[in-house]
Every structure is written in C-alpha cells, then in structure tokens.
C-alpha cells in the first residue's frame, strides 16, 4: 500500500519546515521508530520517525526545500511485505570513505575562511554539491548558542554579543535579569570564541553567521565591546530585523584602548597571567575559581584569537571604526558605559552621532553587566513596548 | 550633437570619413572599396571625397593587399586594408600573423605597423561555410595583433576611430548581421575607452560574457530571464586584445556563475580562453563550472534553418541559465 | 683607362670581399657555438648581386631581403659589429638580439627587414612604393629575394600591383639556381624570369652576377625607371657556393656542378679585372683583404663580448611602449596562486 507522508505541525507556531536531510533513500526499508527525515523549524531540528514499518518509494520534498504544514514529504509503502522485500539500492547511501566532498569553489573558500569542516555540511546543490549558501546554514549550526529559559510567553527577543575573549556565559548575570523581565535571551559564542567551531579574523567574520539568530520579529540587539562593533555590522546588514541597538562600552569609536589587554588575552599561556589581565575588566574582585582560570588559559593558549587581535588593534590603537555605520542606522541606538572602564575610556562617547542616547554608570568597569547588571537591565523595563 | 537613428554601417563609414578628414596619411585599400563602395557598402561614396589615390581598388590578391598595407604602414602611411570576408584570412594569414604581428618585435622595436585590417564575419545571411565563419580565435592567438569586435553602433564608430590612432596593427572584425542594425546614437558622446568591457545589462545571478552579435542574443536572453525572476549580467568585451579581465572578474566574483558566449565553434576558441581565465582567476567565487555556449563544431551550413541552429540562440541561453540556477 | 675611372670597381671589390669574409666569420661563429640558432644562410658566391644593386641605390631608398640577406645589408652600409652581435642574439645587435640572422632590419639604412618566410617581404615594397608615391618622396623600394620565391603566388600578386599602379618599386631576384635543395629547372618551366616581367607589365632584365659592374649598370638603369614610376624585375644569376644552411652538405648536386659553379666567382673576376685594368698590385689587394679580415675578426670579438639581453626585455616591443603590455607568466601565476 502506497502512503503519502505529509509534514505534521511540530510546534504551536509552526507553519512550515525546511527539509534538512533524508536519512533514508528511495528503495530503502525502515522499521517503525527509525528516523526518516530531519525537519528544521523555529531554529530547532526535529527528527521525524516512521510510524510503521515500510519502504521509501519517492522523496517529494528534497533536501533544502521549504514545506508547508500538510504538504507531502514522501511516498512510502507500508506493511511487513515492504519491510521484508529485499531492495538493492541503486547507489551507495553514503560516499565511499576517503571520497572527496563535492563542493563548489566558493563554498570551499568560505569553509577555509570560517574553519568549517565540509564533511559535516549537507549539500543542497546539484548532485548534493555543497554551495556557499549551505555553508552559511552550517555556520549557524556551528554556533554554540545559549538561551535563557522563560516561564512565560516572551515579551520580546534579545540577541547578546559578547566581547573579545568572552563567551555567552559572560552574559549570565544580565541575561537572567532580562529573562525575568520577559525577554527571550539568545547569546552565541562568537566565532573564534568558546565552544563555537568557527574561526574569524575580522568583524565581518564575527558577524557572518549571526543573521540566522535574529528572530523573525523585530528584537533587541545588545553588543559589548568588540561585540558592539559586530552588532553594528549586523544591524547595518539587517536593519529591518532589529528594533533597538544597545552598545555596552563598544569598540570602534576612537583609537584609545588597552592594547596590552587585547594582546595579552591573545597570547596568554598561564592562569596567573590571565587572572592579572582579567582584573582590569571589573571594579569587583575576580570571581573565578583556579580551575576555571586554568581552563580559560588553556583555551586562549590555542591561539584562536591571534588573527582577530591583529585586525582589531595595531600600534596600540584600535583599527576599526564604527562611527559612519552607526550614523547610518535607522533604529534607535544607545550606548552604556562604566565610568571606571580601564579597557576603553568612556570619553569616546564624544565621537557618537547626536541621535545616540548615552547612559553613564558610576562605579562600573568595562564589564558593566558584571559590575552593574541591575542598572543595565533597567534599560529594558518590562512595561516598555518597542 | 543630438541623438539620431544611425546604422552600424553608417557609423563605420562616418568613422572612416572623419578619420580621413583629420589624417591625410590614412588610405583605404581592398577589393571593391572605391568605385563599388565596399561589398557591404561601408566605404560607399568615400571615393567622391577622397579620390582614387586614397580609396584604392585592388586586384583580388588578398595576401598582397595585406602585405602592401604592412609595407605602407612601415613607411609613413596609415592604411586600412579591407578583407571582404574574414574567411579570406586563410589566404592572407602569412602577411597578418608572420609579418604585421611580428615586425615591431623582430626588429627590436625600430619599426611599427600602424595599420587596420577591416573585415567582417559571422552568420546570418546564409553565406555558407566559406563566407560565414568567426575566426577571431586565429587573430587573438597571435601576439602583436590588437582585435576589436564592436556590437553596437556607437562602438562601431568609436572603436574604429580609436583603431586609426593606434601604433600597432589592429584587426577590426565587423559582423555582417549588424550592418543594418539601427540605434539611436549620438556619435559625439563619449564611450568607454578602448580595451574596457561594457556591462550592457546589470544583474546578480549570472554573468554572460560575450562580444559582437552575441551581445544582442545575450540581451534577448536576459530579458526573458528577467521575466522568470533571474537577473543576468551581460558583459560586452568590445575588444579581445586587449581584453578586460578586470570587469569580467568583478562581475563573476559577484554572481558566482559565468557563461561565455561566442558564435565561433566551441573547440579551442575565444570562449575556451575566456572560460579558462575565469576558472583560474575567479575560482574561489564560482558556484558552478564556467559554461561555454558557442557555435556547433561544424562548418556553417547554408540552409537558413540549419545556419540558425548552428549558433547559440537566446532560448538555449535561458534554458542553460535556468538549469544552472535550478529555477 | 685611368685609375680613377676604375675606382668603383675597387669599391665593389672591397664590398664583395667584406661580404665574403663576414660570411666566413659567421660560419665560424656557428662552429664556435656563438650564433643564436642554426638558421644561418650564407650568400658566398652571390656578392656581385648585393654589391652591384646596392651601389645603385640612393640613401632615401628602402629594401626588404630574404633569409640570405647578410651581404645585401653589408653592401648597404651595415656595421658588421652590430650585425654579428644580432646574429649572436645580443642586445647590441641591430634588433636587440630578437631578430637574428633572418630578421635583421635597420630603419636608418632603409632596411625594412629580412624575412624568413619565402616571399614574405615582397609585398611590403609594394606598400612602401604606395607610400613614396603618395607622400611624393623620390624613393624606390626594392625587394631582394631568391629564385625559390619566384614560385610563390605573392610575388606575382605584388608585381602585378606594382605594375598596375606604376609604383617606384624594383624586384631583384638573386637566382642562385637552388631553392633549398631543388634546382631551378625542377621548380619551373620558365626559368627566364624576365619573361614573367613582360607578362606582368614590368620592365625586366637579366644579368650575370659574376660581373658586378654589369649588375650595377643594369640596376641603375632599372632604378632610374622605377623612380619614374616604371617598376622592374632584375634577375641576377649566380651560384650558391655552399649548402642551403650550415648543416647542408649539398648531397643533391654533384662535385662537378659545384666545382664549375664556384668558378663563377664575382670576387675573383673583380680582382683579375683590377690587376689587369688598374695600377693596383696583388700586394695592395692582399693588404686590403687582410684589413677586411681584421675588421671581421673584430666583429666576432665584439659579438662574443656583448652582453646577452636582459630577460625582462623579452616582453618589450610586442606592442608600442605606450600600449598595454603582455602579462608575464610568472606575474599571472603569482596572481592566481597568491595566498591572500
């Protein structure tokens, strides 16, 4: 008996899904419960299992295609007969070991630049060829992303971009406050940082995989330090998807910076040296255990930040400039700075274009969201609709 | 000067007229260029203005026509030799390839050969296998020869005028199917400099790199593709030596896909050279192999139906682009 | 006859001796491995044609030659040092070492180029004649070529055009009896080329190349006519003493034929006439020969010592310096394979 499998609604808000990949090929048999296909929706990937034994006859929704809920995915033959009929596949289901991945030159270049392993990427091009667009998808997938759970329906979304040498976890004090205010917080480890397997040597490389994290509804974008410059780049590229931009002690306004800090983080080898550097970030005592410091020092010693450090700071000066881009942004922009910042002096607010609002916070260093999380969170009051 | 309707043929004639008025050293020689006015009428009535001493009717002696032009160019004249059909290059190739192209080099830069070889090629008039070829590849393969192949009325005028100022031999290949083409043109308006390609239509989905008559075929295809929501960029190379890789590179790096379009037979032709260069220089940006769409590898047949089928048509370009983009 | 009246013959002798000695030194250059390539074609035995015709030319006249043209260029006044350097592929040569033996040229002396394609340079004098006529220069363009070229179509096309347009052009066929290894009677039914001149409407004459004075006289007559718009074909018959090129030992002809051919020696004939008709002594002529030998030895030394061209020069002169230049392969590869 030939049966049409349609796309079920896999979540409340789901209207359509994207076929990520077929785990069975036409002609192959499957047992009830085996995964037939992976469907992506709302940034989550769901495995769709077989509801009965059977044999796949025809794939209707090919890999990469967008399918409406209720639209056909495949046709299969159900029943024991199908499962017991031996079928010889027309070609091997997976490429022979050692076979070279089929990918366009453009995709290979992107993979090299971003440090993506092509073997982990699903190609959507002709003959399964990996194209540049697949890489952009894979980039998003390669991002390590942390989300803070909400107890209620989200009032709005916020995307948080950390600074040089940081990771998503550094947002924890602020993020949990925002979550309590009903904001759905998403924070990635930026490329070249933390658990994200992508590399980057400049602001464009840091920003490249982030677009997919912007929610469909307009939301808050918050960037700290270098993450501020990344946020500006992202806002320039996708102004229609960002309601408001908040920059915390952003890089790229003027030349001055604690260049020793940047170079130090990029080259540090031991926990002692690292602790010494990190003390410059905050007005508070360093709240990291010896084990945490050792783990961080080991990660920095891998040298992933070298190229980035060279691009950002040279001859003791910042090498990036966000002022022109900032002036061209259509959405509301504001800047928050701690008056005790030892990495980038708060006086650089003088370079801001006039429509940008400035909030200065006393008794706070470069890591404002450590030193004054409540005051920062107060900039996102629950009653405000944006 | 205002824009007027002017044909490709009239623009060429005007270029000769204006250049000869300015430069006494220019003479035109070839079969039927004087009293007859040129087999395709390009030199019509010029003899009335410039006389038989400057519009020199020659016997049917293609090697000696080109050879005499070479000698005249070496000794103070700026000759325009007309080869009635590019197919006759087979007769005159020694004088073009072994003599004109190499004299400056062999003689250590002492003597230049500032001549223009005007000729026409291509299909479109059922002229048969010996009068319809596209032999630009022969010329492009010889170092020392400049090569222009105008597609538009303005270029017919300006590229010919520029050819008549160059210090080295220029082969100027017109297209027989373009002579009657009429465009609203202001010949006094500036055009791109010699050696620069023109983006005739901008688009971000695929780059179509071509020259001469095929520019118009590509533009027809781009219009049809536009209706299907596909934006094709059409690049008219205008000159094949020198040729403007910079413009091609910028386009292909943006679109990630390139089609090289040529009327000449596919194998070992201009399209092959362009495709190779794009593959080498734009490799990192390609999303598909560089595709050549060119004439069939056959002599050009006389039957109009067969002749048309032997060279690329807009429908094939549309179909190919849609297959490349899978939409 | 007075000694003064015979001075031209002394000059002819001198020119011919310089050609022969030069060619002998070129052969040595090759044997010593100093010549650029092995394409060397010697004109020994043909000196009468070169010396006689060139003496009749005027400074404003121009000419092209075939591949066996060293003698003609020397007779026109070329510097043997620069010629030898060119044959050796050195930058001090006439063409910066890029032309060599078969592609030598010199604008200053009106040499529009030797040519390695049989018949290749012949139509160029038609074009030059067009220029001179249109620019009202009182100059004649002369094409020198061998009997082999007489069987090329381009010769007939060119002669036809020159005659049709009354151009100041002279065609000089140096008939050394052989097109490479093919004797003239194996190449054509009409070896009397003056007949072809008549057929095409040119003034035609044939002269024995052993008699340099006769060559000069006929050339002068025909050049006067050409200057007035009556183009001509002059055939100078002679014998090519050696093979086609340096490696050619002439297996296609008998020793007897070579012996009798080499007795048609324009230099020996001129020397005998000088001794008979002038007060010049054998000792005086020997001294002249010795001076010429020293001059040509010096040319060899000059060529040997001249520096090789800079490699970068290979890209020069493909096009005029003001124009876009060829991209060297190394530059292109660097561009394509650049790390960034």
Image (cartoon, coloured by chain):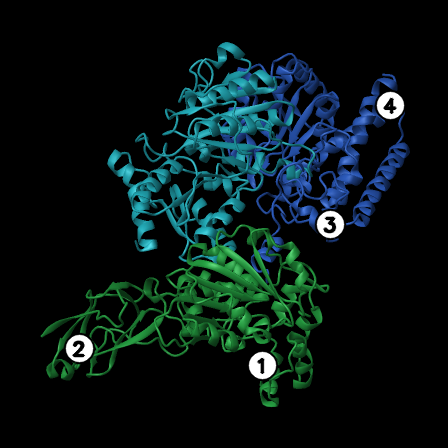
Q: Quadrant of residue C26?
A: top right
Which of the chains bears the disc numbered 4?
C
Which of the chains bears the disc numbered 1?
A
The lab-note entry on whether marks 3 and 1 share a chain reads no
Counting residues from the start of the chain, the first of labels 2 and 1 encountered is 2
- Find disc 4 in the rendering and name its residue: C278
Query: Between residues A151 and B156, which one lies in front from this camera angle?
Result: A151
Counting residues from the start of the chain, the first of labels 4 and 3 encountered is 4
Which percent across, then down, holds residue A3?
Answer: 13, 72
Which of the chains bears the disc numbered 2?
A
- Find disc 3 in the rendering and name its residue: C310
Colour chain B appears in:
cyan
Q: Residue at x 67, y 79 (%)?
A: A279
Mark nearest the camera among 2 and 1 is 1
- Find disc 2 in the rendering and name its residue: A55
Q: Residue at x 75, y 39 (%)?
A: C83
Q: Residue at x 52, y 12 (%)?
A: B52
CB contact under 8 Å: marks 3 and 1: no
Colour chain C appears in:
blue
> Between marks 1 and 4, how big is the CA–CA gap?
105 Å
Residue at the outermost left position: A1
- Find disc 1 in the rendering and name its residue: A299
């Amino acid at each position: 008996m030939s049966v049409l499998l349609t796309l079920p609604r896999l979540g409340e808000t789901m209207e359509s899904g994207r076929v990520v990949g077929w785990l069975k090929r036409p002609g192959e048999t499957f047992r009830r419960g085996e995964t037939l296909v992976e469907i992506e929706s709302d940034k989550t990937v769901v495995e769709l299992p077989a509801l009965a034994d059977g044999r796949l006859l025809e794939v209707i929704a090919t890999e990469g295609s967008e399918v409406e809920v209720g639209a056909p995915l495949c046709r299969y033959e159900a029943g024991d007969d199908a499962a017991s009929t031996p079928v010889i596949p027309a070609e091997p289901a997976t490429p022979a070991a050692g076979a070279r991945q089929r990918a366009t030159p453009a995709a290979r270049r992107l993979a090299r630049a971003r440090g993506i392993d092509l073997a982990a990427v699903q190609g959507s091009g002709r003959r399964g060829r990996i194209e540049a667009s697949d890489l952009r998808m894979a980039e998003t997938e390669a991002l390590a992303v942390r989300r803070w759970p909400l107890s209620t329906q989200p009032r709005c979304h916020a995307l948080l971009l950390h600074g040089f040498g940081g990771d998503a976890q550094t947002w924890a004090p602020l993020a949990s406050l925002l979550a309590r205010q009903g904001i759905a917080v998403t924070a990635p480890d930026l490329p070249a940082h933390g658990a994200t397997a992508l590399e980057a040597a400049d602001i464009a490389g840091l920003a490249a995989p982030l677009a997919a994290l912007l929610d469909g509804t307009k939301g808050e974008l918050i960037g700290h330090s270098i993450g501020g410059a990344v946020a500006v780049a992202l806002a320039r590229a996708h102004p229609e998807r960002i309601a408001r931009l908040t920059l915390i002690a952003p890089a790229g306004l003027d030349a001055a910076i604690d260049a020793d800090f940047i170079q130090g983080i990029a080259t540090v080898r031991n926990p002692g040296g690292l602790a010494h550097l990190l003390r410059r970030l905050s007005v508070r005592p360093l709240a990291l255990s010896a084990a945490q410091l050792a783990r961080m020092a080991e990660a920095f010693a891998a040298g992933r930040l070298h190229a980035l450090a060279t691009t950002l700071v040279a001859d003791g000066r910042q090498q990036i400039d966000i002022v022109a881009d900032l002036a061209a942004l259509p959405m509301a922009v504001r800047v928050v700075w701690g008056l005790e910042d030892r990495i980038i002096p708060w006086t650089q607010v003088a370079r801001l274009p006039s429509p940008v609002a400035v909030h200065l916070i006393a008794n706070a260093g470069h890591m404002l969201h450590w030193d004054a999380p409540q005051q920062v969170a107060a900039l996102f009051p629950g009653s405000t609709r944006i | 000067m205002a824009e007027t309707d002017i044909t490709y043929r009239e623009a060429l004639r005007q270029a000769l007229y204006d250049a000869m008025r300015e430069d006494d050293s220019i003479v035109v020689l070839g079969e039927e260029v004087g009293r007859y006015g040129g087999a395709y009428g390009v030199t019509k009535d010029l003899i009335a203005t410039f006389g038989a001493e400057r519009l020199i009717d020659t016997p049917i002696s293609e090697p000696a026509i080109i050879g005499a032009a070479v000698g005249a160019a070496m000794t103070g004249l700026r000759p325009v030799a007309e080869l009635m059909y590019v197919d006759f290059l087979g007769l005159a190739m020694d004088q073009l390839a072994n003599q004109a192209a190499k004299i400056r080099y062999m003689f250590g830069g002492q003597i230049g050969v500032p001549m223009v070889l005007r000729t026409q090629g291509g299909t479109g008039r059922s002229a048969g296998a010996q009068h319809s070829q596209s032999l630009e590849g022969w010329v492009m393969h010889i170092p020392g020869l400049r090569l222009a192949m105008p597609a538009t009325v303005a270029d017919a005028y300006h590229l010919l005028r520029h050819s008549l100022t160059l210090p080295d031999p220029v082969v100027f290949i017109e297209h027989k199917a373009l002579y009657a083409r009429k465009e609203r043109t202001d010949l006094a308006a500036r055009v791109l400099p010699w050696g620069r390609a023109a983006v005739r239509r901008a688009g971000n989905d695929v780059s179509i790199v071509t020259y001469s008559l095929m520019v118009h075929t590509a533009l027809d295809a781009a219009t049809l593709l536009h209706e299907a929501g596909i934006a094709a960029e059409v690049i008219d190379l205008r000159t094949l030596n020198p040729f403007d890789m910079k413009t091609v590179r910028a386009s292909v790096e943006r679109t990630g896909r390139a089609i090289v379009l040529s009327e000449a037979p596919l194998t070992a032709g201009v399209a092959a050279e362009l495709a190779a260069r794009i593959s080498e220089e734009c490799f990192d940006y390609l999303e598909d192999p560089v595709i050549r769409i060119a004439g069939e590898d056959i002599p050009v047949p006389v039957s109009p139906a067969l002749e048309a089928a032997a060279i690329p048509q807009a429908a094939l370009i549309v179909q190919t682009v849609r297959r490349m983009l899978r939409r | 006859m007075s000694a003064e009246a015979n001075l031209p013959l002394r000059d002819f002798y001198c020119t011919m001796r310089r050609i022969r000695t030069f060619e002998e030194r070129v052969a040595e250059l090759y044997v010593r491995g100093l010549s650029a390539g092995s394409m060397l074609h010697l004109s020994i035995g043909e000196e009468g044609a070169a010396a006689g015709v060139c003496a009749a030319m005027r400074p404003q006249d121009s000419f092209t030659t075939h591949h066996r043209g060293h003698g003609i260029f020397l007779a026109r006044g070329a510097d043997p040092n620069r010629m030898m350097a060119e044959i050796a592929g050195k930058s001090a040569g006439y063409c910066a070492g890029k032309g060599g033996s078969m592609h030598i040229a010199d604008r200053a002396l009106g040499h529009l180029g030797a040519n390695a394609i049989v018949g290749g340079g012949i139509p160029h004098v038609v074009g030059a004649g067009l220029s001179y006529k249109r620019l009202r220069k009182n100059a004649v363009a002369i094409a020198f070529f061998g009997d082999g070229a007489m069987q090329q179509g381009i010769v007939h096309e060119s002669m036809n055009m020159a005659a049709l347009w009354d151009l100041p052009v002279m065609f000089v066929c140096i008939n050394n009896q052989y097109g490479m290894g093919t004797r003239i009677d194996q190449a054509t039914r009409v070896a009397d080329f003056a007949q072809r001149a008549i057929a095409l409407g040119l003034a035609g004459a044939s002269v024995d190349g052993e008699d340099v004075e006769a060559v000069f006289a006929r050339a002068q007559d025909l050049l006067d006519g050409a200057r007035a718009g009556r183009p001509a074909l002059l055939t100078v018959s002679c014998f090519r003493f050696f093979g086609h090129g340096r490696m050619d030992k002439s297996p296609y002809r008998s020793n007897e034929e070579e012996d009798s051919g080499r007795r048609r020696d324009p230099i020996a004939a001129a020397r005998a006439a000088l001794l008979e008709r002038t007060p010049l002594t054998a000792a005086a002529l020997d001294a002249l020969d010795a001076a010429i030998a020293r001059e040509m030895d010096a040319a060899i030394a000059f060529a040997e010592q001249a520096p090789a061209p800079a490699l970068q020069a290979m890209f020069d002169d493909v096009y005029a310096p003001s124009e876009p230049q060829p991209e060297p392969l190394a530059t292109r590869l660097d561009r394509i394979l650049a790390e960034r």
